[in-house]
Amino acid sequence: MRAFTRGDVDAVFAYRQRDDVAAYLFDEPMSRETCAEIVQVRTTQVGWQDEGDRLVLAVERRADHAMLGEVSLILRNQVARQGEIGYILHPQYQGAGFATEAVRALIGQGFGEGGLHRIFARCTARNSASYRLMERVGMRREAHFREHVLVRGVWDDELIYALLEDEWTTLANNQPA
Ligand SMILES: CC(C)(COP(=O)(O)OP(=O)(O)OC[C@H]1O[C@@H](n2cnc3c(N)ncnc32)[C@H](O)[C@@H]1OP(=O)(O)O)[C@@H](O)C(=O)NCCC(=O)NCCS
């Protein structure tokens, strides 16, 4: 994972323009112009100071530096140290465990230097790839809200998954050496 640079616009456009990537996101498929704008903002989203600040990182394959997608961690509550995680991979790079690896690393960073107490994530109940990912990294399903979100005019169920810092420590201690 690394900070975004201005050279990432085409790689971001490659996945953000796609209907299949946007299917369960609040954002519509994006134009190249919009991608250029969000990449510009992301070059500055490298840490937190205030509630609502976002850390947004590019996910790169170590072997060839291919840009695979993005992960984010938003400081939702500064006093209670609550963070929300998000993730998007280009479909070309899905199904190989890259998102799992990146999300684990970001959770470690959130509880480590980020000092968070609880990290949560949410998705529509139809996004099985997303909740399978949350379950793989050890997050617990905390809620299933019925018709809680309106996605492109359609009521949708929303799932909330979460992990506490001590649960993460227990998981880390139980990993095979
Ligand atoms: C959510 C999303 C990032 C998940 O991507 P993914 O490729 O399924 O996740 P990973 O990269 O961790 O790969 C895991 C898959 O690869 C398989 N895999 C292969 N090798 C693996 C490895 N070494 N480690 C872990 N998983 C591996 C897993 O079995 C899993 O497949 P399965 O779910 O069919 O069992 C992806 O679907 C996406 O970008 N969707 C569009 C954007 C989106 O909806 N984001 C979430 C909004 S809430």
Image: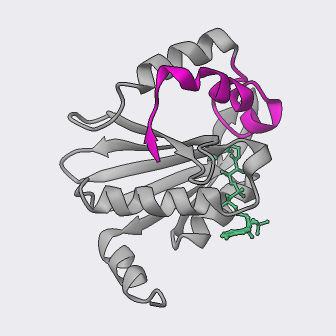
**Residue in the picture at 74% in, 58% down:** 128
Percent from the top left, x then y, of residue 111?
30, 62
Quadrant housing residue 18: top right
Percent from the top left, x then y, of residue 68?
64, 43
Percent from the top left, x then y, of residue 57?
46, 40
Nearer to the camera, 161 or 12: 12
Left or right of residue 36, residue 132 in this image: right
Left or right of residue 153, residue 175 in this image: left
Nearer to the camera, 12 or 125: 12
Quadrant housing residue 56: top left
**Residue in the picture at 35% in, 69% down:** 164
Magenta highlight on residue 27? yes
**Residue in the picture at 76% in, 59% down:** 95
Magenta highlight on residue 18? yes
Nearer to the camera, 100 or 159: 100
When the figure is inspected, residue 69 is found, relative to residue 95, above or below; the finding is above
When the figure is inspected, residue 114 is found, relative to residue 23, above or below; the finding is below
* Start-end of magenta stretch: 1-30
Residue ranking furthest to the front = 64
